[in-house]
Image (spheres, rainbow, N blue to C red):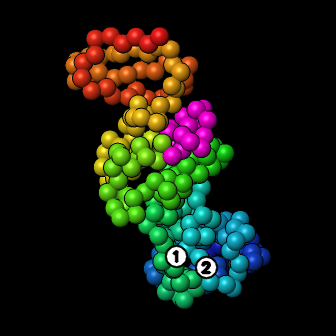
């Protein structure tokens, strides 16, 4: 079947360490009624993905997670690769070549989607992604209420976690932690995992002020209901904490 689908380049498929799997996939594509040209493109993308995957071994059951990683690419080919991956996974499932899927924790899946979002959409580097991941894992372990879970998360839970981290980090490190946490909570809120607005972390709560020695700050307001407190830019804060009420002026010595 490889010679029939790829008469000019069949030797590339026959020399692959996954030659047996590629031959079986080609036969299955024909049996399923795939047209010749799309079948050849699917076959080509499968060969490219498998030959470049160190964690996948020929003759062994295929892990769906390993396959998704092998087929993940950047650029315009990303969508086509994902389509081929789904077809190849279906082939492996019906032919008994797909490894049984172990139960996966919902929070693990959420973290995986979030890391993929940071990498693909936000373009965050691997080192920065590691820092974000460390904060997220720590928050899910120590900041998440065990009796309510992520869907029952409240502002008080976040403030308690930030207060805990303020005792373990310098002021500068705490600012990074708050930035990581805000990004994660905003992502969760936009996708219905938590209530919206939890990313507006109020660090003016007792015990979690990130810049207690600030000599002065300013208040900007468009209306009495939209007053916000802006810390000096030298502190590197990326947010403005909401202030309740209308305060005409504040001075600190």
Identify the residue at image location x=46%, y=53%: 143
Which residue occupies 40% across, 37% down?
A: 201
**Looking at this rendering, what residue extends furthest in the left direction?**
224
Q: x, y percentage for residue 88?
A: 54, 75
* Residue 9 shows in this picture: no
Q: Are marks 2 and 1 in contact (CB under 8 Å)?
A: yes
The disc label shown at residue 237, or none: none
Q: In this view, does 248 lie to the left or right of 107?
A: left
Q: Give the range drawn in magenta.
A: 164-181
Q: Which residue is drawn at 61% across and 35% down?
A: 170
Give me the C-alpha separation between circle 2 and circle 1.
Answer: 9 Å
Residue that carries the numbered disc 1 in the rendered image: 89
**Image quadrant in which you'd find residue 165:** top right
Q: Which of 124 and 20 is in front in this view?
A: 124
Q: Which numbered disc, 2 or 1, marks the residue that appears first in the sequence? A: 2
Disc 2 crowd, CA 10 A, few/some/many (<14, 14-19, 20+):
many
* Mark 2 secondary-structure assignment: loop
Identify whether 14 is placed above or below 187.
below
Quickly name the residue at label 2. Answer: 62
Res. 161 in view: yes
Q: Where is residue 30 in the image (x, y as percent from the top left)?
A: 51, 81
| Local secondary structure at mark 1 | helix
Q: Does 82 sit above or below residue 234?
A: below
Q: Nearer the viewer, mark 2 or mark 1?
A: 2
Q: Residue at x 51, y 46 (%)?
A: 164
Vertical relation: 9 (above or below) 144: below
């Amino acid at each position: 079947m490889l010679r029939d689908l790829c008469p000019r380049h069949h030797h590339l498929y026959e020399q692959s360490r996954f030659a047996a799997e590629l031959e079986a996939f080609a036969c299955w594509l024909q049996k399923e009624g795939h047209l010749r040209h799309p079948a050849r493109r699917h076959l080509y993308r499968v060969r490219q993905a498998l030959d470049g995957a160190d964690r996948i071994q020929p003759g062994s059951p295929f892990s769906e997670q390993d396959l998704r990683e092998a087929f993940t690419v950047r650029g315009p080919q990303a969508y086509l690769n994902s389509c081929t991956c789904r077809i190849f996974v279906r082939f492996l499932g019906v032919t008994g070549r797909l490894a049984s899927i172990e139960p996966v924790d919902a929070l693990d899946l959420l973290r995986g989607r979030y890391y993929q979002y940071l990498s693909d959409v936000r373009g965050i580097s691997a080192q920065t992604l590691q820092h974000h991941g460390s904060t997220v894992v720590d928050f899910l372990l120590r900041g998440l209420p065990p009796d309510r879970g992520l869907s029952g998360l409240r502002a008080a839970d976040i403030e308690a976690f930030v207060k805990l981290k303020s005792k373990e980090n310098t002021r500068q490190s705490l600012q990074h932690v708050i930035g990581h946490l805000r990004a994660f909570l905003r992502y969760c809120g936009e996708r219905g995992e938590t209530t919206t607005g939890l990313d507006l972390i109020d660090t003016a709560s007792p015990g979690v002020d990130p810049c207690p020695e600030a000599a002065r700050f300013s208040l900007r307001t468009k209306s009495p209901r939209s007053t916000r407190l802006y810390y000096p830019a030298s502190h590197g804060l990326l947010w403005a904490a909401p202030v309740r009420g209308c305060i005409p002026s504040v001075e600190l010595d």
